[in-house]
Amino acid sequence: MDTTKQPVPREAIDAYNLFIHGNIDRRAFLDRVKKVAVSTAAAAAIVDQLMPNYAAAQQVSPTDPRIKTERATVPSPNGNGKITGLLVRPVSAGTNRLPAILVIHENRGLNPHIEDVARRIALENFMTFAPDGLTPRYVRRGGHALVTYTVFNGATPHVRVMDPLPAIEGAFR
């Protein structure tokens, strides 16, 4: 019996991209996957390959007592709206000032994996903010996020951004 994974059809990947970006609903996504699959079981296997399992990769629980997490909203200094995100600090820091790290997500938006990265960095005695670059009415222009390139290498984010993310700097002051 061959246990190697079969490649995911391009049409299924395209449907997943439309679904994850909010262009189609879950039912339309599943209908598109069923059209390219040879059976319902094959469609279920394709969906399993496409959907991330964030819980399996989590390293720091959102309820970890060593950190304080909160959803924060940061207004644009230029009046362009607000951006939301996850703000995380180590509890041991109290009210002391800490070095800050901005955790930027890839094109899928602020997801459980990026939130986990922010929590892991906070445990290294940093204040972290993970903004949701897909916050509606703030960073979208023509439906596209303005984060153009992100690589997370160890504990150092390398980011080239366009427009509003530099406005978040004020949240760390």
Image (cartoon, rainbow, N blue to C red):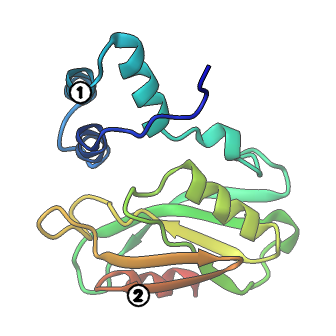
Q: Residue lying farthest left?
A: 142
Could you tell me which residue is drawn at 49 percent across and 87 percent down? 169
In the image, 98 versus 150, the foreground residue is 150
For the N terminus, which image quadrant?
top right
Marks 1 and 2: in contact by CB < 8 Å? no
- Residue 101 drawn above or below residue 20: below
In the rendered picture of this protein, how many numbered marks are placed on residues?
Answer: 2
In the image, 83 versus 141, the foreground residue is 141
Q: Which mark is residue 18?
A: none
What amino acid type should be assigned to the residue bearing mark 2? Arg
**Residue 132 % position (x, y):** 42, 62
Could you tell me which residue is drawn at 41 percent across and 13 percent down? 41
- Residue 43 drawn above or below residue 131: above
Answer left or right for 31 relative to 2: left
Could you tell me which residue is drawn at 25 percent across and 86 percent down? 78
Q: Which residue is mark 2?
A: 160
**Residue 95 % position (x, y):** 77, 76
Mark pair 2, 1: CA separation: 37 Å
- Image quarter of residue 158: bottom right
N-term-proximal mark, 2 vs 1: 1
Q: Which residue is mark 1?
A: 36
Answer left or right for 130 relative to 97: left
- Image quarter of residue 92: bottom right
